[in-house]
Image (cartoon, helix red, strand yellow):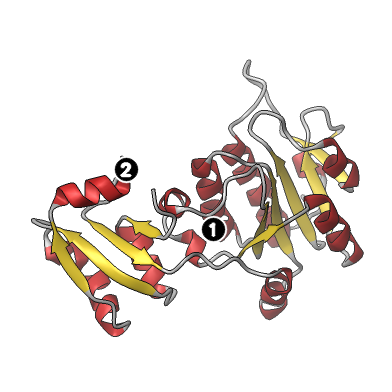
């Protein structure tokens, strides 16, 4: 699937709201235009043309993803720079709150975490350039358009990035099933980056050693681990809870 496609009503709507450059929209023949009024209005305002095409054409482009009768061809996704996510926190008058994803390979997990990051007030998501999912049409669709609103920084070396963040006063907190501290034992009202590891391997040894704290999720069931995006959601919302209501 081409990475510059935006698939589905919500992702296309959010891309238009964020004024991302869209080359064109394709609408499936037979799609009720009344359901797309908001999208077509934004398209007109942004000077984006659309055309009706056979639904089979969209099926081919979407490669199994649910396109809901609409696909946009966009410019390539533009990754943010580190300074942008620090500036975003400063503009909101908030302590930095970042998410570091160490080798998340499943694009659906990446998309889900970006969606949660938007909801939880994360200022930026940091991913590595190699051996990890990058922002694709599938990621954008799974994020329900949140990729248009949460800056994603793509770095060459997560270990060097960790050092840079620590030098700038950001505390790195890693999830570890064997950690002595529970997730809720820490006050997250300081500058913080939550680190989530690969779906199978977890966080790399060097990166974990650079983390200032490790925390564990309380697990009472018989299954010893959670899906990466679910664990990430719990981590992010604990930071949000701590910041809004204090540690206790």
- Residue 206: x and y, percent? 87, 41
Q: Which of the two labelled residues, at mark 2 and mark 1, occupies the earlier sequence position?
A: 2
**Mark on residue 119?**
1
Pointer 2 residue: 63
**How many angstroms separate mark 2 from mark 1 (CA)?**
28 Å
> Going by the picture, which residue comes out furthest to the top?
222
Q: Counting other residues with Cα less than 10 Å from the Cα at mark 1, is it few (<14), some (14-19), or many (20 or more)?
A: some
173 shown above or below 32? above
Q: Which marked residue is nearer to the observer: mark 2 or mark 1?
A: 2
**In the foreground, 38 or 245:** 38
- Dot 2 lies on which element? loop
Residue at image coords 67%, 80%: 91
**Mark on residue 149?**
none
- Residue 121: x and y, percent? 61, 62
Image side of residue 147 versus residue 2, left or right: right
Residue 224 visible at all: yes
């Amino acid at each position: 699937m081409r990475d510059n496609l935006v698939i589905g009503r919500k992702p296309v709507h959010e891309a238009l709201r964020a004024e991302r450059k869209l080359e064109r929209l394709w609408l499936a023949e037979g799609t009720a235009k009344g359901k797309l009024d908001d999208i077509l209005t934004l398209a007109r305002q942004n000077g984006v043309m659309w055309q009706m095409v056979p639904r089979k054409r969209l099926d081919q482009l979407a490669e199994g993803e649910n396109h809901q009768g609409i696909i946009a061809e966009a410019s390539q996704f533009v990754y943010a720079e580190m300074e942008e996510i620090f500036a975003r926190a400063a503009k909101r008058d908030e302590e930095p709150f970042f998410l570091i994803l160490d080798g998340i390979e499943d694009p659906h997990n990446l998309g889900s975490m970006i969606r949660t990051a938007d909801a939880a007030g994360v200022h930026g998501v940091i991913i590595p350039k190699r051996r990890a999912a990058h922002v694709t049409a599938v990621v954008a669709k799974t994020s329900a358009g949140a990729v248009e609103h949460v800056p994603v920084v793509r770095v060459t070396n997560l270990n060097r990035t960790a050092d840079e963040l620590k030098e700038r006063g950001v505390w790195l907190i890693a999830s570890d099933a064997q950690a002595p501290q529970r997730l809720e034992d820490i006050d997250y009202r300081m500058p913080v980056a939550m680190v989530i590891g690969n779906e199978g391997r977890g966080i790399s040894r060097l990166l974990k050693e650079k983390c200032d704290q490790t925390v564990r999720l309380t697990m009472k069931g018989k299954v010893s681990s959670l899906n990466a995006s679910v664990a990430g959601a719990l981590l992010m919302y604990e930071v949000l809870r701590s910041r809004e209501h204090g540690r206790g």
